[in-house]
Image: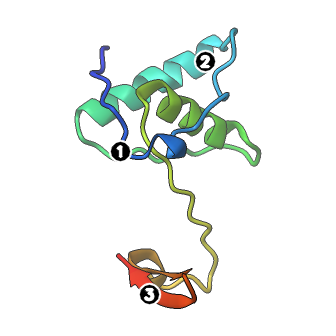
Amino acid sequence: VSYKLKTPKSPELVPQNYISDSVAQSVIQHLRWIMQKDLLGQDVFLIGPPGPLRRSIAMQYLELTRREVEYIALSRDTTETDLKQRREIRGGTAFYID
């Protein structure tokens, strides 16, 4: 599987230091599977036991492909509007970003 790397628009949002010198074979298989899904334009949903492994695999993939990440914490109080817009304050003025 091969992937053409693109230059990120916001390089500061690309994860760093998630890939170590020795990556487990099972993680490599997961990364390959994610890349195949990505090349096909399909969504990926990682399922597993509680712990940091799923996030680590996702961050490793983003680091490998030089893609930006945006973390969104979900709770039962999260609404659709919360996902579509966020409020930022700059220079003492509040405004919404899609």
Q: Badges 2 and 1: C-beta atoms under 8 Å apart? A: no
Residue 39 sits above or below residue 97 on the image: above
Q: Quadrant of residue 81?
A: bottom left
Residue at 57 percent across and 38 percent down: it is 15
Residue at 34 percent across and 47 percent down: it is 43
Q: Badges 3 and 1: C-beta atoms under 8 Å apart? A: no
Q: Quadrant of residue 9?
A: top left
94 left or right, relative to 38: right
Residue at 51 percent across and 18 percent down: it is 29
Looking at the picture, how far across and down is residue 55, in whole percent? 63, 43
18 left or right, relative to 33: right
Q: Secondary structure at mark 2?
A: helix
Q: Residues within 10 Å of mark 2 (few under 14, many from 20)?
A: few
Label whose residue precedes the other's in the sequence (3 or 1): 1
Give the residue type that dot 2 points to.
Ser
Q: Which mark is residue 26?
A: 2
Q: Which mark is residue 9?
A: 1
Residue corresponding to mark 3: 95
Q: Secondary structure at mark 1?
A: loop
